[in-house]
Amino acid sequence: MDLLDILTDTTVDTLKLFPFLFITYLFLEYFERKMTDKTTALVQKAGRFGPFIGSLCGALPQCGFSVVAANLFAARIISIGTLFAIFLSTSDETLPILISNAASPWLITQIIGYKFICGVIFGYLIDYLWHQKHSTPNIDIEQLCENEHCHCENDDNIWLPALHHSGSITMFIFIITLILNILFATVQPENIINSMQTPILSELLSGIFGLIPNCSASVVLTQLYLENCINIGTLFSGSLVNGGVGLLVLFRVNKHLRQNLKILAVLYICGVVGGLCGNLIF
């Protein structure tokens, strides 16, 4: 693949995310201006069902909901367990690759269903175990605006601030994704993953590979599984932690670096545990 193809693919993939970002920030801007005490209470109450609803949404065949989740968590609208549920259940490119390779409906149901169940279980578990101040939604949209330096708090027009936020994040995603796509084209990571045949070690390495914030990771892992180069546990370890560019956006919009690193570490552990359990179950 030449540089022009890489640039074209990166541009198309990034532009696909823009509508998700714009709608999310439009919602956040509206919430900031129109929110009442009753609305806040409703959001916080609904948060109890967040991991289930989040895991259900993440299982849908799209690439933008993990991006939405990162922004909503940064604004403290969803709980940390809901964030994990969405990241773990997000299929990214897994489902399209399975369908395009004419995988059986039963196999597709097993993979997507298992990711959904892992999202629900780990989501509620993390909400229960994580510190209370992180697990209860607490609307903090003004902080999100301060982080982006948009100075839009006194502007009655919600469209321009939403456009500012989405454009800024889209450009950030484009630059990082372009770098990663060039690396993928150069290194050919499937050769590295293809050499992993050792039990447990393969799940550990696949989890690290899956953390790469790029859809190529899920494409490579799914293709290798369909070609019988890796087992289903290795596929789960990588695909559970791979939420597209959701992690990338989280580190961009959530300025609590220590918290982000904890989320990254716990997400990795959940992915590996989920992969090992998947090997035992299937």
Image (cartoon, rainbow, N blue to C red):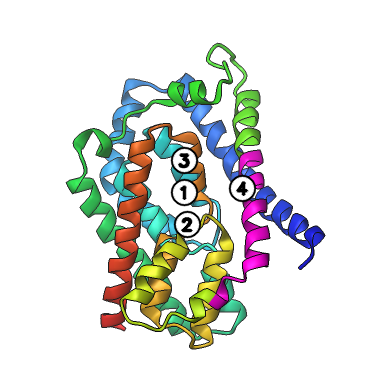
Please tell me whether mark 1 or mark 4 is closer to you in this view: 4
Q: Which residue is mark 3?
A: 251
- Residue 157: in magenta span: no
In the picture of the structure, the residue carrying the numbered disc 2 is 243
Q: Is residue 177 magenta?
A: yes
Is any part of residue 126 visible from this angle?
A: yes
Q: CA distance from mark 2 to mark 1?
A: 7 Å
Q: Which residue is mark 4?
A: 176
Q: Nearer the viewer, residue 228 or 94?
A: 228
Name the element at disc 4: helix
Q: Which mark is residue 247?
A: 1
The answer to the question of whether label 1 and label 3 lie on touching residues, with beta carbons closer than 8 A, is yes
Q: Quadrant of the N terminus?
A: bottom right
| Element type at mark 2 | loop
Magenta region, main secondary structure: helix
The residue range painted magenta reads: 170-191
Question: Could you tell me if the residues under marks 2 and 1 are in contact, i.e. CB atoms within 8 Å?
Answer: yes
Neighbor class of circle 1 (other Cα within 10 Å; few <14, some 14-19, many 20+) is: many
Which residue is rendered at x = 43% and y = 31% of the image?
A: 255
Question: Which amino acid type is shown beneath numbered disc 3?
Answer: Phe
**In terms of secondary structure, where does tag 3 sit?**
helix
